[in-house]
Amino acid sequence: MEETIAIVLAAGKGTRMKSKKSKLVHQIYGKELVKRAVENARKADINEVIAVVGYQKEQVQAVLGDTVKYAVQEEMLGTGHAVMQAKKFLEGKKGKVVILSGDVPILRPTTIKALIEKGTERKEYATLLTAIYDNPSGYGRIIRDEGGNVKAIVEDKDATEMQKEIKEINAGIYCFDIEELLKALEEITPNNAQGEYYLTDVIKIMNDKGLKTGAVIVEDNTEILGVNDKVQLELLTRVLRLRINTEHMRNGVTIEDINTTYIYDDVEIGPDTVIHPNTTIKSGVKIGEDCEIGPNAYIREGCELANKVKIGSFVEIKKAKIAEGTKVPHLSYMGDCEIGAKTNIGCGTITCNYDGFNKSKTIIGDNSFIGSNTNLVAPVTLGSNTFVAAGSTITDDVPDYALAIARQRQINKENWNKK
Ligand code: UD1
Ligand code: CA
């Protein structure tokens, strides 16, 4: 049976992050770099993923858990050596193995798929992902023959002056024939400028045997960006932000300011919804059509908003299911709640959902009016067509059509201030 396996190289040290934490467990939009690399493989329909871990492996393993198999690289002897550590998972298997870097988190799954498909179509034993860089220094250069066939990769430190002029670089992402990769790995040596076992040497070894190799040039160079320090971490977060926001805009969402709108992964937003600046929407949130969100809104995990919902400024919502046409216009925290249709949540309304031990739920029906500055002490249920007087602290359920007032009566002391 032909299989497709992925190996994620995740043994590296990441000194330039200047962090106690492994570079690979730093997050972009709430998700660790290495987790993103593994998920990219899965989204490219690769089920079996092997992570090569080493430096601070406990941290990497804590993030990936049992979603992958592990190979351990005890000593950093190079990328070829790293892949060799996963040998036991490849032996006796036929098919393709895709090599990914744990610190290259925003590679598109479609690019991984294209790499596999092109390689298969062209009957190549190795297919590399490459890019054209104006400034290629530091990267491995792609050596092609007159016919344009990929013949070898030469590392920057081993390159001749002429080879250094080559602008096509190795992205460090590959698709190999499993059996031929295992054979070629046996032949690599550390006889090079860095004294390392280079995975890249496999290309020349295969060519010397007459095995065809090739390349796919990535269209969007930002996909292959890696993270080595915190400046690059921010850069990649920005690239991902623009990519995600652009996708939503193409689907009909209006985003006023692409730079200050933070939409995490796997968010659904319907067309004609408007997102105002300084809005954050966490992973998995679902927002309907014709909604208005922000400015300065924080839509946290577990929220589902139907069509025509308004979430205004300085509003934080979490695990809130809000039905059509309901408005939470200003200065509210609504957590762990279900709110019916066409209800108005007055300015400053708060769900008191946490008693220090447990989270409790607030349920509000349709067509209700919650007056400004109301505290809803959960668990509490308010029916439909209810009216809560401003400034109330609601601790008891409110039946349909009722008015609830839960505040001290005002006393006016006549002429008191003349004294
Ligand atoms: C590698 C490529 C180079 C390419 C570049 C793209 C080699 C020899 N060179 O260079 O052609 O242009 O990537 O970024 O492969 N790793 C391990 N164990 C090791 C060494 C590395 O797990 O012993 C991991 C690193 O953590 C990293 C990846 O492999 O995730 C690439 O290693 P890195 O040292 O960054 O390779 P480069 O020298 O940059
Ligand atoms: Ca690198």
Image (spheres, rainbow, N blue to C red):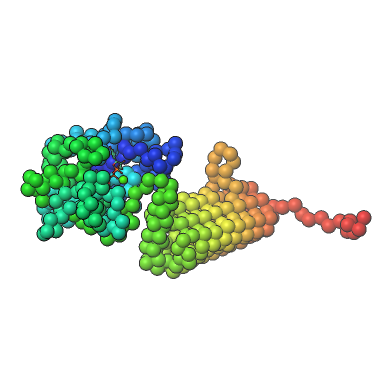
Residue furthest front in the image? 161
Residue at figure coordinates x 57%, y 60% from the top left? 313
On the image, the x and y values in percent for residue 222 come to 33, 56
- Residue 309 located left or right of residue 34: right
Q: Nearer the viewer, residue 84 or 151?
A: 151
Given residues 321 and 405, the one toward you in this image is: 321
Rendered location of residue 80, percent (x, y): 22, 39
**In the image, what residue occupies the spot 29% across and 34% down?**
76
Check the picture and name the quadrant holding the C terminus: bottom right
Extreme residue toward the left, this view: 210
Q: Quadrant of the N terminus?
A: top left
In the rendered image, residue 323, in percent from the top left (x then y), is placed at: 49, 60
Q: Give ligand 2's quarter of the image.
A: top left
Q: Camera-side residue: 224 or 177? A: 224
In the displayed image of the protein, which residue is found farthest to the right? Answer: 419
Measuring 45% from the left and 53% from the top, which residue is drawn there?
A: 282
Tell me: 59 left or right of 76: right
Q: Is residue 256 above or below residue 103?
A: below
Residue 39 left/right relative to 387: left
Q: Position of residue 400 (x, y in %)?
A: 59, 58
Q: Nearer the viewer, residue 325 or 182?
A: 182
Residue 4 visible: no
Is residue 292 visible to the viewer in this orientation of the structure? yes
Relative horizontal placement of residue 337, taking residue 114 as reference (left or right)? right
Q: How many marks?
A: 0
The residue under the point 57% across, 43% down is: 354
State which quadrant residue 315 falls in.
bottom right
Looking at this view, name the residue that lies furthest to the top: 74
